[in-house]
Amino acid sequence: MFSQGEIERYARHIVLHGVGGPGQQKLNRARVLVVGAGGLGSPLIQYLAAAGVGEIGVADDDSVSLSNLQRQVLHGTGDIGRSKVESAAAAVERLNPHVKVTPHFMRLTAGNARGLVEAYDVIADGSDNFATRYLVSDACFHARRPLVTAAVGAFDGSLTVLRPYEAGADGRPNPTYRCLFPETPPEGASPPCSEAGVLGALTGVLGSLMALEVMREIVGFGESQVGKLLLVDALLMRFETLRYGWDPNNPLNGDKTEVGPIT
């Protein structure tokens, strides 16, 4: 049951067709793991907290630096030098004290990813490298957890939702992250933002879209984005959606499985 204060706080959701009281209760019961408390994680965490998600786990092993503040709006000047997970927890407490934040000051590895993922209902990956994205997506596959994953470049971004442990309407397995990106791009193909730069507000757009997709996964409104890749071009101000499918050669749920369970 909601307190009177919570009813007022979430009033615009409660009267919203497609969410309502039952949807808000689902949000309040949900446990969401956010991987990365940086440019994508900042708006994502803020909107999940404002929406009343019951518990938000935040996994990151970095600390706040001055160069982060151009886009990582969860943190402030006074947080410089503080761990991002600690800064994120303090920000959520200021925004919505009804939300529990569980900080995980850690780097995800093959040895700890699945155990962490299994403790949550929905996973949102805003990490900044392919190694972590593959690791998180593999862990979500084996743990049977839905994954919302996004990435940004200098002026572009992408987002997709993954449920590869389920079958689609055609009876074939849903695609995995490895169906979309079979191989890691060659070194230097995707330079870090410290070299290429990144438009600060673009991370806000993609992070907010991630929050929207997480809420859609929890509440169940709208059309599924599984098998769809949303592309955002900030130079042309264009949004485009591409469809992609299951690759029988992928090593997770393909015809010849190669990637074993992550412990």
Image (cartoon, rainbow, N blue to C red):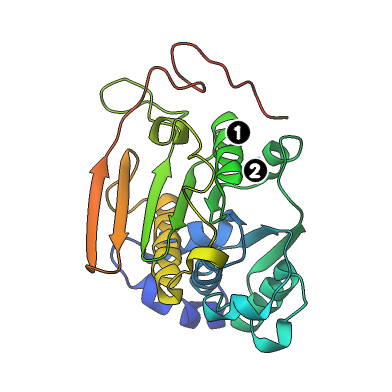
Q: How many neighbours does mark 2 have within 10 angstroms: few (below 14), some (14-19), or many (20 or more)?
A: many
Q: Amino acid at mark 1?
A: Ala
Question: CB under 8 Å between callouts 1 and 2?
Answer: yes
Q: Quarter holding the N terminus? A: bottom right
Q: Residue 154's quadrant in the figure?
A: bottom left
Query: Could you tell which of marks 1 and 2 lies nearer the N-terminus?
Result: 2
Q: Where is mark 2, residue-wise? A: 117
Q: Where is mark 1, residue-wise? A: 143
Q: Quarter holding the C terminus? A: top right
The percent coordinates of residue 93 (x first, y second) are: 67, 78
Q: How many neighbours does mark 1 have within 10 angstroms: few (below 14), some (14-19), or many (20 or more)?
A: many
Q: Secondary structure at mark 1?
A: helix
The percent coordinates of residue 212 (x first, y second) are: 40, 62
Q: Amino acid at mark 2?
A: Val
What residue appears at the point 45 percent right and 65 percent down from the top-left corner? 207
Q: CA distance from mark 1 to mark 2?
A: 7 Å
Query: In screen coordinates, is 183 left or right of 170?
Result: right
Residue 97 visible at all: no
The percent coordinates of residue 232 (x first, y second) are: 30, 60
- Rendered position, 29 above or below 78: above
- Rendered position, 21 above or below 161: below
